[in-house]
């Protein structure tokens, strides 16, 4: 059994009621409602005595307001108000009698202003106001059920007029005879239509007589072109039979939707096709069950079938769609008030939601045992009126506006039900998406004042129309910079005006304390039971409020907002971050692209000590000078110990940890700003303290490619601390290698700086090799004990630069290193100066690098260079022993190019014979070999020359015989006595073709300059 929904609400409110005992002595049998305007409706009441009563009811705003006042009045005065309302809202117009039998069915046809009445098995037609005489339609007696055809669209249903003439086999024999005799012939008062292709009218009905299902159309004799629907009111109507189908006996109820006719009997429900005439059972009813009932759901174009207390919604094909509706009991009658199903029984009316199946409202309109009840609703139109009837009384109910229903739920704090209602109305097309967003925002504010901050923000985020500026008053007190941006009076006034979160929490806590006191006194309150059982603390509530408002503002930042609203969102978001001391979020916001107002935040952040956030904010706003000043202060305070150093650890790929101190972080952030600045004065002002912390950062600042305008090199070099030698060297290296500077001053300065550093490094290295040297202790604290910013040693960098550059002054550098032990560097400089002897002496004697010395001799390219080197090896001077092994190596590698006599004269008498004998012997053999080889080459050259001469002579002495039959190989003209030419490939052309071809290209296309023709000779063969 269905249970009442705890979220029940008022959907229908009583509008009026009338006691019919003074108008009819018998009870009511049928009921129908029709709207003639937005402010007035008609109620048709059929009685068991055959009378049709017509009532007029006012449904305008005044009547609705009166009904609302009646429903909300105290019970002791409701009866008086009901009587007064019935007098003002309802009026009896007139009645018409159709005989002594009950009026079974009423069909209001508002489009033609008629009412179709089924009474005693006959059908009658009367005008809508019952002002004209009743017309009894000439049709077969015994009609037990009638239903009007409802078409969803022309495409979803078949035009019966187009098939009526082609389906004679499904018509009765009498109808076939009538059609053969001719259309339009009236037989027993029934007219048959000719099979003419025309559109079907709106008044097509399915009539059940016994086992016959007859499809008819209600037509009027003067329904012609030029006539309007209202012109038909005075016309006489008649039925035209379209088709007849064999049916089943005992039909109690019928519905016709598109091409499907669904009928109900005590045995079950069946479906008939109006096109083919075929039928099928949808399902059978149990032996003991309530009478079958069918209700057409107009909006969905579906059919509700009742099986006892269960309602099954099916489509036009009889297939169930959606879930079943389970009612409390089997109803006497069923109506529809979209999106609800209305049921009446035993003096009670129940409203069920068609989608959820829940009972929304229960209304009592009659006492227990009042008898069978009837419900009727407007089949077309806006559908806001429902009439229910007991055997002696009719009560009218008006649908409460959707807005009032939502307000009622919100006042009861049924927030979920309110949202569900709006979503349902939106699905039904009765409410816009903007209203859904409006209600979400309204629910959010109500929840916020009820201290349910997370749920409130969830609703805020679901609202597409709510502006972020609406939460500004909860963060900053009025008046403020953004006060004028806050929308005023946008909601229904169900919540207090916005106030700072502190006040909202305080007021909420007071309400909780008051509720606890009242609960002890036995008085129920609207405060949440969880708050009463476990009262929250002020700090927890305030923290929750701030966190959730932060969540809303963070999402709002991603939306497209006006500049002023975006400024408010970012600035107030920073306020809330600071309130919770969320430093990481503060710095993330300040360092990213933001719209914060600096003037609103700088005092706040400075007083609270969030200088890092303030520095990030200054930098994001282009206030670089202020940002750099703060980073400098932070670095100084971290290093002096005044502030706690915020050390940051990061994991490296090799598994180790990289520890970065606070002063290094300050230098890193400052360098990021300086890398983009083109303000040379500001860059050089902060370069010093950054270089003290990390020289690499200083170099990155000076060599940054991010700035638009590069710094002046001379001023930068002058500003660099002379003690920061590596920074100067790295900057000069960048100028020379990356900026392709050709300034000799920079090249010389770089070479001198490297040379000086190399001398100092050499001295430190020499001292470190002698542990007893007193200078070792002082060297430990020199700059060279620190980690270098270069990966390669200074001497290697010096040597590479001295070799690669030609723009420095070698003499100036040589003067600097003259007294040092940098022999390789001296050799490079002497080479630059062209001092070959000094270079060989350094390479051979000082460095004893025989390979380098021999390579240098090869670069010189003269044989005397090797002899000079050999002389140095054999006579080193300065008391040094002769370098016989080096001399032998030289003779071994290059002895073939030396004069043996000079070598023998140069050899020292002290040189061991066994070292030189093999080398000298090889020299002599090589000398002889070179001599013989030269003679062979000379003779071969002479032979080739003789061969060439002979070949030329043969070519010159060649003869060719031309007769009268000889033809030119190009134009094929007879040569005769013409001048001709012959190419080396023996082709012959006339002189004209020779001029055209040229002397190097023959008729065959061969170019003799590129493709030389070789002919065999006595030396050269093919």
Image: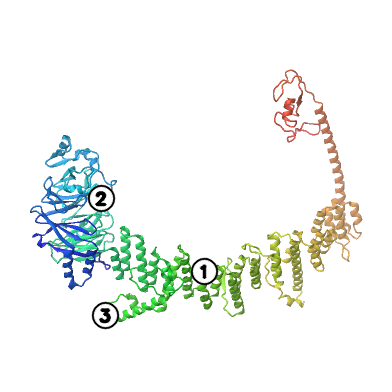
Which of discs 1 and 2 lies nearer the camera? The answer is 1
- Quadrant containing the N terminus is bottom left
Number of labels in the image equals 3
Circle on res. 522: 3
Q: Mark 2 — residue?
A: 316
Quadrant housing residue 403: bottom left
Q: Residues within 10 Å of mark 3 (few under 14, many from 20)?
A: few
Q: Earlier in the sequence, mark 1 or mark 2?
A: 2
Is residue 266 something one can see in this rendering? no
- Quadrant containing the C terminus is top right
**Percent x, y of residue 246:** 17, 44
**Percent x, y of residue 630:** 58, 74
Q: CA distance from mark 2 to mark 3?
A: 56 Å
Q: Earlier in the sequence, mark 2 or mark 3?
A: 2
Q: CA distance from mark 3 to mark 1?
A: 52 Å
**Percent x, y of residue 814:** 81, 65
Q: Residues within 10 Å of mark 1 (few under 14, many from 20)?
A: few
Q: Nearer the viewer, residue 621 or 763?
A: 621
Residue at the limit of the structure toward the top, as seen here = 964
Circle on res. 588: 1
**40 relative position to 189: left or right:** right
């Amino acid at each position: 059994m269905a249970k009442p929904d705890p979220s029940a609400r008022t959907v229908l409110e009583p509008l009026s009621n009338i006691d019919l005992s003074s108008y009819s002595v018998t009870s009511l049998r049928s009921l129908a409602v029709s709207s003639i305007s937005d402010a007035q409706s008609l109620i048709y009441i059929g009685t068991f005595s055959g009378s049709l009563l017509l009532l007029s009811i006012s449904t305008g705003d005044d009547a609705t307001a009166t009904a609302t006042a009646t429903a909300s009045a105290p019970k002791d005065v409701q009866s008086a108000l009901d009587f007064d309302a019935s007098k003002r809202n309802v009026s009896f117009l007139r009645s018409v009698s159709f005989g002594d039998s009950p009026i079974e069915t009423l069909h209001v046809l508002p489009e033609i202003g008629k009412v179709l009445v089924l009474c005693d098995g006959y059908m009658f037609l009367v005008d809508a106001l019952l002002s004209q005489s009743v017309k009894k339609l000439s049709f077969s007696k015994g009609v037990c059920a009638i239903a009007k055809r409802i078409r969803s669209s022309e495409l979803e249903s078949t035009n019966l007029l187009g098939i009526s003439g082609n389906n004679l086999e499904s018509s009765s024999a009498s109808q076939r005879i009538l059609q053969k005799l001719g259309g339009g012939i009236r037989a027993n008062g029934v007219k048959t239509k000719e099979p003419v292709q025309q559109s079907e009218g709106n008044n097509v009905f399915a009539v059940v007589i016994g086992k016959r299902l007859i499809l008819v159309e209600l037509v009027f004799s003067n329904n012609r072109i030029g006539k309007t629907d209202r012109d038909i009111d005075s016309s006489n109507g008649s039925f035209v039979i379209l088709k007849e189908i064999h049916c089943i006996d005992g039909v109690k109820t019928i519905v016709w939707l598109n091409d499907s006719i669904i009928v109900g009997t005590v045995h079950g429900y069946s479906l008939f096709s109006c096109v083919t005439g075929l039928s099928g059972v949808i399902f059978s009813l149990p032996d003991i069950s309530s009478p079958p009932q069918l209700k057409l759901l107009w909006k969905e174009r579906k059919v509700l079938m009742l099986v006892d207390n269960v309602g099954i919604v099916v489509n036009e094909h009889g297939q169930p769609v959606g879930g079943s509706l389970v009612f409390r009991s089997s109803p006497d009658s069923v109506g529809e008030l979209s999106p609800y199903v209305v049921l009446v029984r035993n003096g009670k009316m129940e409203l069920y939601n068609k989608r959820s199946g829940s009972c929304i409202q229960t209304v009592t309109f009659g006492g227990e045992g009042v008898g069978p009840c009837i419900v009727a609703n407007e089949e077309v139109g806006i559908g806001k009126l429902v009439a229910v009837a007991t055997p002696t009384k009719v009560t009218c109910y008006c649908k409460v506006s959707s807005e009032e229903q939502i307000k009622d739920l919100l006042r009861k704090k049924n927030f979920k039900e309110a949202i569900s209602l709006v979503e349902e109305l939106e699905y039904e097309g009765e409410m816009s998406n903007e209203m859904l967003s409006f209600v979400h925002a309204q629910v959010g504010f109500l929840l916020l004042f009820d201290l349910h901050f997370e749920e409130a923000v969830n609703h805020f985020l679901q609202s597409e129309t709510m502006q972020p500026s609406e939460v500004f008053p909860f963060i900053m007190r009025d008046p403020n910079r953004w006060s004028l941006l806050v929308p005023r009076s946008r909601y229904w006034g169900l919540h207090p005006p916005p106030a700072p979160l502190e006040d909202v929490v305080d007021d909420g806590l007071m309400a909780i304390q008051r509720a606890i006191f009242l609960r002890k006194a036995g008085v129920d309150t609207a405060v949440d039971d969880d708050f009463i059982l476990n009262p929250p603390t002020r700090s927890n509530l305030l923290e929750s409020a701030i966190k959730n408002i932060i969540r809303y503002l963070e999402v709002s930042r991603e939306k497209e907002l006006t500049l002023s609203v975006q400024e408010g969102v970012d600035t107030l978001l920073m306020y809330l971050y600071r309130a919770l001391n969320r430093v990481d979020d503060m710095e993330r916001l300040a360092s990213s692209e933001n719209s914060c107002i600096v003037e609103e935040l700088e005092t706040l952040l400075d007083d609270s000590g969030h200088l890092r956030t303030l520095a990030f904010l200054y930098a994001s706003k282009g206030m670089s000078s202020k940002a750099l000043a703060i980073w400098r202060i932070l670095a100084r305070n971290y290093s002096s110990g005044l502030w706690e150093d915020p050390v940051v650890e990061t994991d490296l790929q090799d598994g180790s940890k990289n520890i970065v101190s606070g002063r290094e972080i300050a230098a890193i952030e400052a360098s990021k700003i300086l890398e983009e600045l083109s303000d040379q004065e500001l860059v050089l002002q902060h370069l010093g303290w950054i270089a003290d912390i990390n020289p690499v950062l200083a170099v990155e600042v000076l060599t940054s490619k991010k700035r638009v305008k590069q710094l002046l090199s001379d001023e930068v070099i002058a500003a660099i601390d002379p003690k920061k030698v590596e920074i100067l060297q790295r900057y000069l290296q960048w100028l020379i290698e990356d900026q392709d500077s050709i300034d000799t001053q920079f090249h010389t300065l770089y070479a001198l700086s490297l040379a000086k550093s190399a001398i100092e490094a050499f001295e430190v290295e020499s001292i470190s090799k002698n542990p007893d040297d007193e200078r070792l202790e002082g060297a430990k604290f020199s700059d060279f004990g620190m980690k270098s910013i270069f990966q390669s040693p200074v001497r290697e960098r010096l040597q590479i630069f001295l070799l690669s550059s030609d723009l420095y002054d070698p003499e100036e550098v040589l003067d600097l290193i003259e007294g040092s032990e940098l022999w390789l560097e001296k050799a490079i400089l002497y080479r630059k100066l062209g001092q070959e002897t000094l270079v060989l002496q350094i390479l051979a004697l000082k460095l004893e690098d025989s390979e380098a010395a021999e390579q240098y001799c090869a670069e010189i390219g003269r044989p005397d260079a090797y002899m000079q080197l050999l002389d140095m090896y054999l006579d080193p001077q300065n008391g040094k022993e002769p370098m016989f092994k080096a001399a032998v190596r030289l003779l071994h590698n290059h002895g073939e190019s030396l004069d043996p006599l000079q070598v023998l004269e140069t050899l020292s008498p002290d040189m061991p014979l066994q070292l030189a004998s093999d080398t000298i012997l090889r020299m002599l053999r090589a000398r002889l070999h070179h001599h013989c080889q030269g003679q062979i080459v000379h003779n071969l050259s002479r032979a080739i020359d003789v061969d060439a001469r002979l070949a030329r002579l043969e070519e010159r002495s060649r003869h060719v015989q031309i007769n009268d039959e000889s033809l030119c190989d190009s134009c094929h003209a007879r040569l005769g006595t013409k001048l001709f030419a012959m190419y080396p490939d023996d082709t012959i052309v006339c002189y004209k073709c020779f001029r055209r071809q040229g002397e190097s290209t023959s008729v065959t296309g061969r170019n003799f300059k590129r493709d030389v023709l070789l002919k065999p000779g006595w030396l050269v063969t093919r």
